[in-house]
Image (cartoon, rainbow, N blue to C red):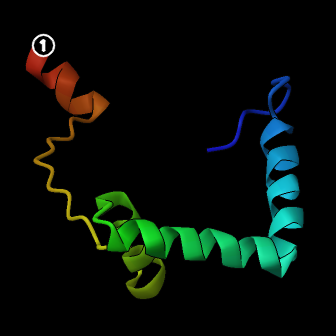
Amino acid sequence: MAAPEGNSNRFKGKVFKSIIEERLEQRKLFEQIVDTAFAQAIEGDKDARNWIADRVDGKAVQAIEADLQVTTHEAALNDLK
């Protein structure tokens, strides 16, 4: 979620993102990151394995259940009577 308009932090994330994108345009750096992730995964790093799996298969869908009761303004007034 982005910072609301008028917030002094609104554009800081975009600057950081643009710096990352510039670095990743240098293919060699990106390849080093991937190579490091594979080496860590082979050594047993669970986070590295998950990172690779998320990039290959996409992140798993997480189901969220909710039991909601919606009360309208009129219903709430009727309950008070």
In the rendered image, residue 20, in percent from the top left (x then y), is placed at 80, 58
Question: Could you tell me which residue is drawn at 72 percent across and 74 percent down?
Answer: 30
Q: Going by the picture, which residue comes out furthest to the top?
A: 80
Q: What's the amino acid at mark 1?
A: Leu
- Tell me the residue at 27%/35% (across/down): 72
Identify the image quadrant of the N terminus: top right
Q: Is residue 18 left or right of residue 44?
A: right
Q: Residue 57, located in which quarter of the rendered image?
A: bottom left
In front: 9, or 35? 35
Q: Residue furthest bottom?
A: 56
Residue situated in front as seen by the camera: 76 or 18? 18
Q: Is residue 38 above or below residue 10?
A: below
The residue singled out by tag 1 in the image is 80
Where's the C terminus, which quadrant? top left
As helix, strand or loop, the secondary structure at mark 1 comes to helix
Q: Is residue 22 left or right of residue 67?
A: right
